């Protein structure tokens, strides 16, 4: 369940709200490393930041990863189409 939650949290629609939530917790010194919600927030944000961090890598590495992601998205679209599902944007 925590793995699914972490993967779903990489969706950019959560980026600004989760970053604001973390910033508020840190600036108010309200982050509790023993609190499960705080640990979940941090774990999810670490995965999210790793997910969006590709563009800061050297271009040769970033390009390879971008090509892999493109191929994955195209394959997903093909699979959705073959299953008569709406194709993800």
Image: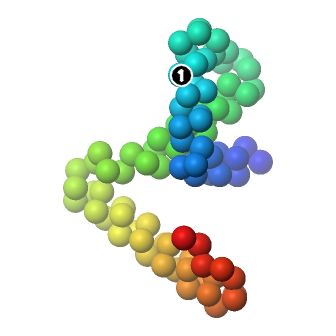
Would residue 45 appear left or right of 57 to someone viewing this image? Answer: right
Task: Specify whether 68 is left or right of 81.
Answer: left
Q: Quadrant of residue 34?
A: top right
What residue lies at 58% left-to-right and 49% top-to-bottom?
A: 13
Mark 1 highlights which residue? 23
Q: Residue at x 77, y 48 (%)?
A: 1
Look at 39% across and 45% down and name the residue there.
Answer: 53
Task: Count the numbered circles shown.
Answer: 1
The image quarter in which residue 65 lies: bottom left
Left or right of 49 on screen, residue 11: right
Q: Is residue 3 visible?
A: no
Q: Is residue 25 above or below residue 4?
A: above
Image coordinates for residue 29, horizontal then vertical, percent: 59, 9
- Quadrant holding the C terminus: bottom right
On screen, residue 67 above or below 10: below
> In the structure shown, which secondary structural element does the residue marked by tag 1 occupy?
helix
């Amino acid at each position: 369940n925590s793995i699914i939650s972490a993967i779903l949290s990489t969706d950019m629609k959560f980026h600004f709200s989760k970053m604001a939530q973390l910033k508020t917790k840190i600036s108010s010194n309200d982050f509790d490393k023993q609190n499960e919600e705080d640990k979940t927030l941090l774990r999810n944000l670490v995965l999210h930041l790793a997910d969006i961090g590709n563009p800061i890598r050297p271009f040769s590495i970033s390009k390879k990863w971008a090509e892999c992601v493109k191929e994955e998205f195209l394959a997903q679209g093909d699979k959705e189409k073959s299953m008569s599902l709406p194709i993800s944007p």
